[in-house]
Every structure is written in C-alpha cells, then in structure tokens.
Amino acid sequence: MPFVIEDRRAIEAFAEATQPIELRSPDGRLLGQFVPVEPSKKMSFPEFGMTDEEIFRQDNDPNTKWYTADEVMERLRQLRKKA
C-alpha cells in the first residue's frame, strides 16, 4: 500500500539516500526501513544493507572466513556455558 509523504525535508532525504534508512517514531520505536531504488545496484536482500554485487564480491573473496553449521553450534554452546 503506497504511503504519500508531504514533508519536503523527508522527501529530499529519501531522494538523496544511497543506502537503507531506518524509519523511527518520535519515541525511537523502529517502524521499518526505506530502501532507495537504484536500478544499477540491485538489492535482493535489502535488510542486509548490501547490494548483490557487494554480497557476490564477499562470497568470492578468498580471505573470507567461513564456518560450518557444526562450528557455529559449538560456539553457541560455549557462549551458553559462559552465561
């Protein structure tokens, strides 16, 4: 459902955005996220705050450290023991 914004300052801020912006109520409650449209920089998962190109580059970086599911579960068990 479209929501029309009348506030010129808000319109300008959204128009100039180059990355996702959190939208909050005056009391600080998170309402959602605005993701700017950039046809040249597709974001399949805007909640990550990274373009598809950035995700692809990170996935293919030989220096990226990857962990197996078993390694992650073991680390979680260790953290639970410390708590």
Image (cartoon, rainbow, N blue to C red):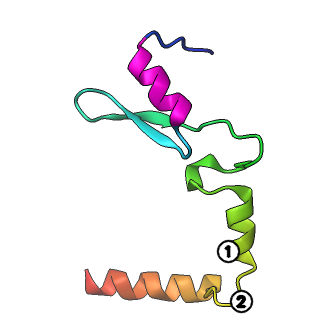
Mark 2 lies on a secondary structure that is loop
Specify start and end residues of the magenta stretch as a single range: 7-16
Q: Position of residue 52 (x, y in %)?
A: 73, 58
Judge by depth and name the residue closer to the eye, 8 or 68.
Answer: 8
Question: Residue under circle 1?
Answer: 58
Q: Position of residue 68 (x, y in %)?
A: 65, 86
In the displayed structure image, the side of residue 34 where residue 60 appears, left or right: right
**Disc 2 marks which amino acid?**
Pro
Residue at screen point 64% across, 90% down: 63
For label 2, count other residues whose C-alpha is less than 10 Å away and answer few (under 14), some (14-19) or many (20+): few
Q: How many marks?
A: 2
State yes or no: discs 2 and 1 in contact (Cβ < 8 Å).
no
Question: Residue under circle 2?
Answer: 62
Q: Is 2 rendered above or below residue 15?
A: above
**Disc 1 marks which amino acid?**
Gln
Mark 1 lies on a secondary structure that is helix
User: Which quadrant, please, contains the N terminus?
Assistant: top right
Magenta stretch contains residue 36: no
Residue at screen point 67% across, 74% down: 58
Residue lying furthest left in this view?
Answer: 27
Question: Could you say which quadrant of the image residue 50 lies in?
Answer: bottom right
Rendered image: mark on residue 75: none
Magenta stretch contains residue 14: yes
Residue at screen point 70% across, 83% down: 61
Residue at screen point 53% across, 44% down: 20
Distance of label 2 from label 1 (alpha carbons): 9 Å
